[in-house]
Structure formats: structure tokens, C-alpha cells
Image (spheres, grey):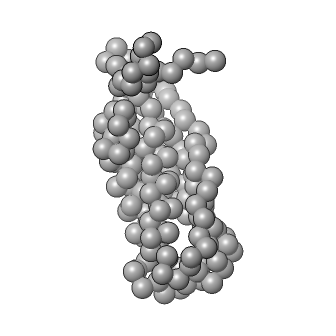
Amino acid sequence: MKKLTHVTSSGEARMVDVSPKQIVHREALATGKIYLQPQTIRLIQGLQIKKGDVLVVARVAAISAAKKTSDLIPLCHNIPLSHVDVQFEVKKDFIKTSVKVRCQGKTGVEMEALTGAAAACLTIYDMCKAVDDKMVISDIHLLEKKKSEIQS
């Protein structure tokens, strides 16, 4: 079993010291789903939700949340992101959100991708709550993380 990196030997929370690490290209992909009533999906697709274009606002929310992750998650490092890509897959009764985050840094961007996916789902929920009281957010998880040397 791996040792917890954010806890000292005496059990205190701590921020991991990444100063000795090399700067490398890092990437993470996270996803989440929000289940909605089929009629709500149709309203979203028809741009008939009164608060506006749900997927445009959810995309901006995901990007903003990824950039602000260290403000929300206490032990996360503040990472300057180089790219956040947000995609939606709209099905009959759910919307799947995929958030890919990239940076050049000393620590991974998993939390930024996960935070972006969660924020997108929460934004869809907020924008649709007036017309659908049966929404369920689920399956928020990391699909992949990668790091590679920076090519000069």
C-alpha cells in the first residue's frame, strides 16, 4: 500500500514539497455524468432553458474551476495551466462531461481536471433545477494522467 503524501508521520495535514521535482509536461483527463429527464435534455438542446445556453456556461464554469482548484482544495498547489479542454456528450437521459487539463509543472493536474468535471455537472444542475428535480450527478472520476519530458 502506498503512503499518504499529504499527511505527516504524526497524522497532520501538509502540503507536499515539490521544489526538488523537475518541470515536465503534465496532462489529466477526468469525466463526470449528470442524469436528467429526457425532456430536460431536449430543452437544453433547443436552447430553451431560461438561464441561457447550458453547455456554453458549463464549459466556462469547468475552465474557471480548473484554474481555481487550489482555492477550493486546501492542499493543492497553485498550478499555471496551459490548456483546459471541455467536451460534452449529450445522450437521451444524461450528459457526459470530459475535461482535459495540461500544464508544464512539478506536480500533476488530476485535481484540476476533476474539479472542472464536477463544476460542469454542478453548473448544468444549477441551470436546470427549475425544470428538473430528478437530476443526479455521478461517476466523476479520473480517466488518465500522463507526464512526459519537455522537448527542447
Residue name at image x 44 percent, y 70 percent: 126
Image quarter hosting the C terminus: top left
Residue 74 x/y as whole percent: 35, 37
Q: Name the residue nearer the viewer: 16 or 21.
A: 16
Q: Name the residue nearer the viewer: 11 or 147.
A: 11
Residue name at image x 45 percent, y 40 percent: 111
Asked whether, in this view, residue 107 is left or right of residue 71, the answer is right
Q: Quadrant of residue 102?
A: top left
The image shows residue 16, relative to residue 58, as above or below, that is above
Asked whether, in this view, residue 78 is left or right of residue 35, the answer is left
The image shows residue 27, relative to residue 115, as above or below, that is above
Residue name at image x 58 percent, y 50 percent: 140
The image shows residue 128, relative to residue 81, as above or below, that is below
Q: Is residue 101 visible?
A: no
Q: Is residue 5 visible?
A: yes
Q: Name the residue nearer the viewer: 149 or 117.
A: 117
Instruction: Return the residue found at the far right.
Output: 92
Residue 151 x/y as whole percent: 42, 27
Residue 17 x/y as whole percent: 34, 19
Image quarter hosting the N terminus: top right
Residue name at image x 55 percent, y 47 percent: 30
The image shows residue 149, relative to residue 82, as above or below, that is above
Asked whether, in this view, residue 92 is left or right of residue 84, the answer is right
